[in-house]
Amino acid sequence: MYRTHTCGELRMSHVGQAVTLSGWVQKGRDLGGMTFVDLRDRYGITQLAFNLETNAALAEQARKLGREFVIMVKGTVAERSSKNNKMETGDIEIICSELHILNPADTPPFTIEENTDGGEELRMKYRYLDLRRKPLQQNLMLRHQAALETRKYLSGLGFMEIETPFLIKSTPEGARDFVVPSRVHHGEFYALPQSPQTFKQLLMVSGYDRYFQIVRCFRDEDLRADRQPEFTQIDCEMAFVEREDILQTFEGLLKHVLKEVRGVEIGEVPRMSYDDAMKYYGSDKPDIRFGMKFEEITEIAKGKGFPVFDQAEIVVGICAKGAATYTRKQLDELTEFVKRPQVGAKGLVYARVNEDGSIKSSVDKFYNEDHLKDWARQLNAEPGDLILVMAGETEKTRKQLNELRLELGNQLGLRNKDDFKPLWVLDFPMFEYIEEDGRWFAMHHPFTSPKADDIEAMMNNELGKVKANAYDLVLNGTEVAGGSIRIFNKNLQAKVFEVLGFTKEDAQEKFGFLMNAFEFGAPPHGGIAFGFDRLCALMGGVESIRDFIAFPKNNAGKDVMIDTPSVIDEAQLNELGIIVKNENF
Ligand code: ASP
């Protein structure tokens, strides 16, 4: 009754047909004796025409329509006299004979067009209106397709999608849990899963050797830009596999989804060890869309009387191709960039390789042309290139140079969002020591298996030496997936908990269910989880994952549309047995 077609459907071939359309009024305009209305739904926009001469009453009614009114019209498809080739339906219009207002609308707080005049906060408050805009519709469509293609690919390989519970007991994945109080058991709490990690491992014990789930995860982490307290993973686990099986299978998933959703073909995904990633890119998620690999020049830079380098543990540089044209001002800005507290470097040394091969540096006082040519040789710098060098303590300096490299990549336009360059990063350290806490933490999570060769080192508590059988899939400098081969032996698992500072009782109380399961025939297994929101955002070429979530939280972790988190009334608190010590009460 409401419509025979959508607003994106009618073409020249429909001319002469009687149709019924429903949708939202995008805008109206009066031209001489005609009133035109753009009618919108999620499929497109169709022009409606009302003729004052032939149907004055109807045209009058059309003139009074406000933006975002929901209307239904009946009419005949006609060829337009002035066609609009920017619109898919631009060849036709509907000569209307009936108009029904299904629901009037208040004037929207911002324009509902491709480019809106609405500020971030306002659009979040009226998210349901923002979602009417085309860019967001396209994002949600991309997300839908990515989910669909994921299900197709994995189902095709025999994976089963199995749901796991949301009301669980805490699973440590490095973040805090969101907790849910139990009404029936006062003083007791469920935790929302940070991921289905333990459940998917139990499913392997149960024999469901290929599991996946597109699943919501919850992490109560400190707020950072573009982080969502709830987010979605493509969570996967396989039994009777080695690392190679996992890498092949999920490289295949990325390839399939990129091809089907974006039409992009990627070749074999290169691999790099964590140690190399840190050495050559100063990051465990290198953006390999561009070069500028780190070159250490410690040996040749030391001993020439420049105290900063002489005292440094490492002197390391990058070569920016064609950037010798950088002006003094631009170089000063780069120096300022690395000195910002977020980067924290003390300074930056540069050397320009001029077109005639001569080299000018910011440390000419200490280094003559021959010395600088040695640098250039080591860094593969040619005439026209710019060399940038940093020095200091190894790990810190590498991280700082990573920031500079990425900034230069941006400035030089080397980080094209339509260029997709995935990378496997392998062999992560098993543990990391966190100074503030004074203890070791699992770098991935406690269920990750150490590399077979390093089990002995772990047993001897040489924790810094132990590598994990863990891997990350990095896309354009962003981690899109991470996983590991798991421990499936109770004693080894108990040892890891011990190393992480759990007492025997603690480990038993928290993870007894898993360790016991390992005693009932646990197969070797491993898995991975993709950050689904992030993957969609990358495929859509957009920075923010929020644009790919229908109803996201803002940067303060709030949903300003429904206004949450919010206080709950005392009766509800009493029922839950919760006493709130807060000035609001
Ligand atoms: N559960 C892990 C995570 O959320 C992924 C995995 O190891 O499969 O990062």
Image (cartoon, rainbow, N blue to C red):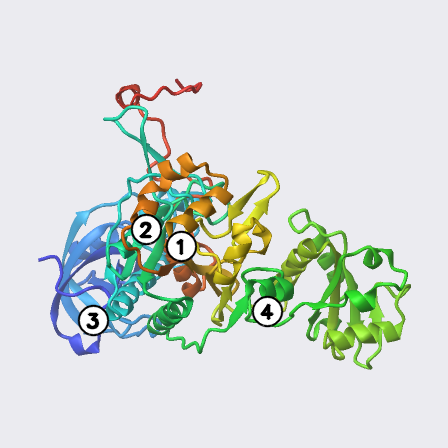
**Of label 4 and label 3, which has the lower sequence position?**
3
**Of label 3 and label 1, which has the lower sequence position?**
3
Q: What residue type is labelled 4?
A: Gly
Residue in view at x 62 percent, y 41 percent: 435
The quarter of the rendered structure image containing the N terminus is bottom left
Q: Does the residue labelled 4 lie within 8 Å of ligand 1?
A: no
Q: How far apart are marks 3 and 1 (CA)?
A: 59 Å
Outermost residue toward the bottom? Answer: 356
Query: How busy is the neighbourhood of tag 3: few (under 14 within 10 Å), some, or many (20 plus)?
Result: many
Q: Mark 2 points at which residue?
A: 518
Q: What secondary structure is marked by label 3?
A: loop
**Of label 1 and label 4, which has the lower sequence position?**
4
Q: Disc 3 vs disc 1: which is toward the camera?
A: 1
Q: Position of residue 409 (x, y in %)?
A: 61, 66
Q: Distance between the residues labelled 2 and 4?
A: 51 Å
In this rendering, the answer to whether 491 lies above or below 315 is: above
Q: Quadrant location of residue 389?
A: bottom right
